[in-house]
Structure formats: structure tokens, C-alpha cells
Image: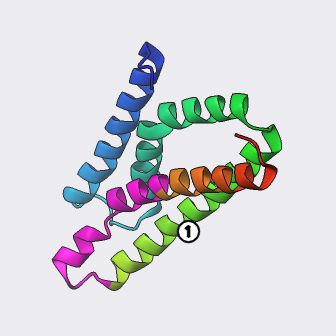
Amino acid sequence: MTLTRKSFIVSLAGLLVAWLGLTLVWLGVVDETSPVTLVLVIGGMIGIFLPALRETYRDEMARFPAEVVRRAWYAGVATGAVTVAIFVALGEATAGDPKLHTLFSLPVAAIAGVLVLMVTEKGVLRISRGKNGSQ
């Protein structure tokens, strides 16, 4: 990924927003599963990864048919969102065990969601490329 001033600022802002959400939880100002925390942490993590995701999307739009790329990204976003929801539910279910509760925390959920998004999207593109017989 090419680091530009704009992408650096977006990633830095995402980091600060996620940090703010985590700090509010650590200080006890808000609950771990409050909407404020979810928006700050997950939104911040998306902001951290957004420049890389945007560049990946542009590169793929240049290499593959637009409809295939859109479908791949829709599948990726859906699986990423489901992953985050599963992590949040598991975090709630493991509230009594500190180690498991930390494993299923919001930052880990957001990172896992983005990684699942990227893996699913790449997999869908690879499968569609094999079906079409293109390179």
C-alpha cells in the first residue's frame, strides 16, 4: 500500500477514535457493550484499515469486472459483520472468565471482522476467476 498523507491521517484518526472508545470503557464511563463503545471501537478499527481497503478495491476494479468485485465485497462485508456479531456474543457469554472475555473483546472482534472480510473477498474473486477462465 502506498502511504499518502491522506491515508496516514485517516488511519491515525481511526486509531484515536478506537483508543477513545477503549479508554472510556477502561475508565468505567461506559459499558463494554454500549452503543457508544461499539461505534467508537468498531468505527475506529474500520478507520485504521480504510485506506488499505480502498486501495485494494480500486486495484480489483481495474483487474476484474465491476459486478464480480461488488459481489465479492458484499460477501466480504456480510461475513465480516457476522464475525463481529459472533465475537460480541461470545464476549457477552464469557464475561465471567477474564481471559476468554479479553479474547472476544471489541478490538479483537473488529480486527477479525476486517480480516474475514478481506479473506472472503479474495476467495470469492479467486473462485470467480476460475469459473470465468480468466487469469
Q: Secondary structure at mark 1?
A: helix
What residue does disc 1 label? 82
Q: Residue at x 27, y 58 (%)?
A: 25
Indicate whether 96 appears above or below 75. below
Residue 58 percent location from the top left of the image: 64, 29
Residue 100 percent location from the top left of the image: 23, 77
Q: Residue at x 24, y 50 (%)?
A: 23
Please tell me which residue lies in front, 108 or 19. Answer: 108
Give the prevailing secondary structure in the magenta stretch. helix
Q: Is residue 37 visible?
A: no
Q: Is residue 95 left or right of residue 61?
A: left
Q: Residue at x 17, y 75 (%)?
A: 99
Quadrant into which the C terminus falls = top right
Q: Amino acid at mark 1?
A: Val
Residue 116 percent location from the top left of the image: 49, 59
Q: Is residue 29 left or right of residue 111?
A: left
> Which span of residues is magenta-colored?
94-115
Please tell me which residue lies in front, 130 or 38. Answer: 130
Q: Residue at x 44, y 27 (%)?
A: 10
